[in-house]
Image (spheres, rainbow, N blue to C red):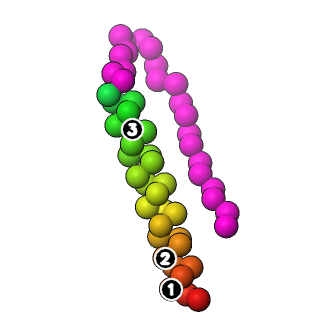
Amino acid sequence: MNFEIEAGLKPPSFEVEYEIDRDEIRAVGRNIAIVCVAAVTARVLVALISR
């Protein structure tokens, strides 16, 4: 199984005071994890169904 995950990381412009709460980072990480798990689950289901 091939897993291709592209992550475009662009540093935000620091012209204005820029603050990221740890809760926001945690929420984003949780969303990314959910999406990855959903993608893996979908691939596994498709593989099982198509057998």
The kind of residue tagged 2 is Leu
Provide the residue designation for mark 3: 28
Tell me which numbered mark, 3 or 1, is placed earlier along the sequence.
3
Tell me the CA gap for discs 3 and 1. Answer: 31 Å
Q: Is residue 5 magenta?
A: yes
Residue for point 46% across, 19% down: 13
The disc at residue 15 is none
Provide the residue designation for mark 2: 45
Tell me whether the residue at label 2 lies in contact with that at label 1, contact meaning CB atoms closer than 8 angstroms. yes
Task: Tell me residue 18's x, y (percent).
Answer: 37, 15
Tell me whether the residue at label 2 lies in contact with that at label 3, contact meaning CB atoms closer than 8 angstroms. no
Classed neighbour count for the residue bearing mark 3: other residues with Cα under 10 Å, few (<14), some (14–19), many (≥20): few
Task: Tell me residue 51's x, y (percent).
Answer: 59, 89
Which quadrant would the N terminus be assigned to in this image?
bottom right
Classed neighbour count for the residue bearing mark 2: other residues with Cα under 10 Å, few (<14), some (14–19), many (≥20): few
Q: Residue 24 sits in which quadrant?
A: top left
The kind of residue tagged 3 is Val
Q: Secondary structure at mark 1?
A: helix
Task: Tell me residue 23's x, y (percent).
Answer: 32, 28
Magenta part of the protein: which range?
Answer: 1-22
Tell me the CA gap for discs 2 and 3. Answer: 26 Å
Residue for point 43% across, 39% down: 29
Q: Is residue 46 above or below residue 34?
A: below
Relative depth, front residue between 19 and 30: 30
- Decide whether the magenta segment is chiefly helix, strand or loop: loop
Q: Is residue 4 magenta?
A: yes
The disc at residue 49 is 1
**Circle 2 or circle 3, nearest the eye:** 2
Classed neighbour count for the residue bearing mark 1: other residues with Cα under 10 Å, few (<14), some (14–19), many (≥20): few
The kind of residue tagged 1 is Ile
